[in-house]
Image (tube, rainbow, N blue to C red):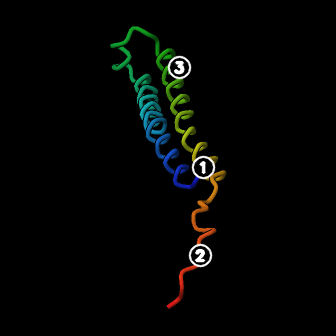
């Protein structure tokens, strides 16, 4: 795998995992704050503890999704081999 492929894989995982992870974490934070407001909880049938548990699950799952592109990026760029296209080519003449 070349460095270019590693960067492309990192960008793709950032788009497919990082962005949804940020959205889930943001929804979890909003739900966590909303579970403490009595006016918001009056519209729901569950208890504030259930809403807080759901918010915690969203935040944890969002955090896991955010970590996926970071781990893939570090591992793919670290183990990427440099391109070997110019190793056996002759040197151009100097002018």
Q: Which marked residue is nearer to the observer: mark 1 or mark 3?
A: 1
Res 53 label: 3
The extreme top residue here reads 45
Q: Nearer the viewer, residue 5 or 67?
A: 5
Q: Nearer the viewer, residue 79 or 47?
A: 79
Residue at figure coordinates x 42%, y 29% from the top left: 27
Where is mark 2, residue-wise?
Answer: 90
Q: Are marks 1 and 3 in contact (CB under 8 Å)?
A: no
Q: Write down the quadrant of residue 42 in the picture.
A: top left
Crowd around label 1: few <14 · some 14–19 · many ≥20 (10 Å): few
Residue 54 lies, with reference to residue 14, above or below; the image says: above
Res 66 label: none
Q: Nearer the viewer, residue 83 or 27?
A: 83
Mark toward the start of the polypeptide (2 vs 3): 3
Res 1 label: 1
Q: For the residues marked 1 and 3, what is the alpha-carbon distance in whole angstroms? A: 42 Å
Q: At which x and y percent is residue 88?
A: 63, 68
Residue 70 lies, with reference to residue 80, above or below; the image says: above
Residue at figure coordinates x 54%, y 28% from the top left: 61
SS class of the residue under badge 3? helix
Q: At which x and y percent is residue 66?
A: 52, 38
SS class of the residue under badge 1? loop
Residue at figure coordinates x 47%, y 34% from the top left: 21
Q: For the residues marked 2 and 3, what is the alpha-carbon distance in whole angstroms? A: 65 Å
Q: Write down the quadrant of residue 20 in the picture.
A: top left
């Amino acid at each position: 795998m070349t460095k270019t492929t590693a960067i492309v894989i990192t960008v793709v995982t950032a788009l497919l995992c990082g962005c949804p992870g940020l959205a889930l974490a943001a929804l979890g934070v909003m739900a966590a704050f909303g579970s403490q407001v009595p006016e918001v909880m009056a519209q729901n049938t569950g208890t504030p503890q259930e809403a807080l548990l759901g918010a915690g699950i969203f935040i944890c799952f969002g955090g896991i999704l955010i970590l996926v592109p970071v781990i893939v990026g570090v591992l793919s760029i670290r183990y990427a081999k440099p391109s070997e296209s110019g190793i056996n080519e002759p040197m151009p003449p100097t002018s």
